[in-house]
Image (cartoon, grey):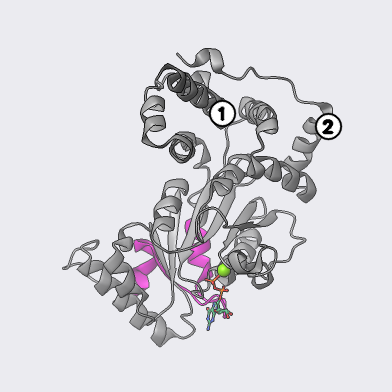
Amino acid sequence: MLTHEALTTQALTPQRLQQISDARQHKKLAVAKLVSLFENRLKESAQERHDIICHLQNEAPPRGSIIGFTGTPGAGKSTLIAELCKTLLAKDTQVSVAVLAIDPSSHISGGSILGDRTRMRITENAERLYFRSQASNLELGGITQATYHATRILRYFYDFIFIETVGIGQNEIDIQHMAHHTFLVMQPLAGDQIQFMKCGIMEIPDSFVINKCDEDRLAKSSYYMLRTALKHARLVEASATDDVKQAHKENIFMISALKQIGLEPLAEKILTLRDQGKHRSDDRFYLNKLIAKQYGEFGLQIIARVDDHDEALLPTFEAKQRAAEAAVRAQIKLV
Ligand SMILES: Nc1nc2c(ncn2[C@@H]2O[C@H](COP(=O)(O)OP(=O)(O)O)[C@@H](O)[C@H]2O)c(=O)[nH]1
Ligand SMILES: [Mg+2]
């Protein structure tokens, strides 16, 4: 039904090919320009985005693993990510990381340049590291469509895409959807655990980071507190033994980003999450969100009829979007 609306793929210009080749070498300007093209999602550049993804996909599937870091403001996410990046890049001389920081303060400051960027004390000239702040103007403090679209392109150029987002309800759910692995970053003895238990949010993260474990005693007490909370939430069997030395094996990481304690096991864990990128496309999830926003339940019902086999004929988000919008508009005319 929808295939005749599919975008035909066109050849890229020599300039665009050069830009892609530069981005592959992690040249920041080229990466930034490509990410902007995807973030902005201007209608007139939909064809180009489609062509770029088809071109990249043709050469190799996306490799980047998306790793989410969520948690309350002030838990130390930015500091942790900065230290973790340094550890990772030093540990593995091949690995490359892109960081997308979604800055909730941009509501107030009107821009996402300041805020967290100043706290991400990453050496900007590290070649294998790309950093970008995103304003969270679309959905309060969290994952936006722009985040998803930025990851679509970044996954072809970087081994890991770290997303920093504030944990307030819906964002955890969204980050869980987008990320291959989600870390909940907490601070010790702040009552976060109890808070999260109440919200049912404990179930969402794949791993826990207790940050600000600046001293051993604090690390241990925080570990036991978290284990108790997990047992309460029935995420760990009540009878399970608690062994602080084995914590990282059960995906609990006790860290002081400030004092650079405990980063090694976390970096090792992250390296095991490599190459997850090719296993999933979330186009449909974000397309549904877009259509729901534009056309509500009516639109969703119509696009639900797009068969799965159409995925092969509609290989990009842009192709799916065009087909879906055409289908919805056709129905509107009929009604
Ligand atoms: N004591 C201590 N403070 C930390 C640690 N990590 C971060 N901080 C501080 O906590 C504050 C908030 O950190 P930030 O990374 O901006 O938190 P975010 O809002 O979660 O991104 C800053 O003042 C950091 O210096 C840590 O391991 N120990
Ligand atoms: Mg931050």
Picture layout, residue 35 above or below residue 312: below
Picture layout, residue 174 above or below residue 87: above
Nearer-the-camera pick, 196 or 267: 196
Label 1 residue SS: loop
Mark 1: few/some/many CA within 10 Å (<14, 14-19, 20+): many
Image quadrant of ligand 1?
bottom right
Residue type at mark 1 is Thr
Q: Which residue in the rendered view is the most extreme toward the right?
A: 15
The region drawn magenta spans: 243-269
Label 2 residue SS: helix
Mark 2: few/some/many CA within 10 Å (<14, 14-19, 20+): few
Find out whether residue 147 is within the magenta segment.
no
Residue type at mark 2 is Gln
Q: Position of residue 194 (x, y in %)?
A: 30, 74
Q: Is residue 286 visible?
A: yes
Q: Label 1 CB, ligand 2: below 8 Å?
A: no
Q: Which mark is residue 316?
A: 1
Q: Position of residue 34 (x, y in %)?
A: 71, 41
At 41% from the left edge and 22% from the top edge, which residue is drawn?
A: 306
Q: Which quadrant of the structure image shows residue 200?
A: bottom left
Nearer-the-camera pick, 171 or 100: 171
Q: Which mark is residue 15?
A: 2
At 64% from the left edge and 28% from the top edge, which residue is drawn?
A: 50
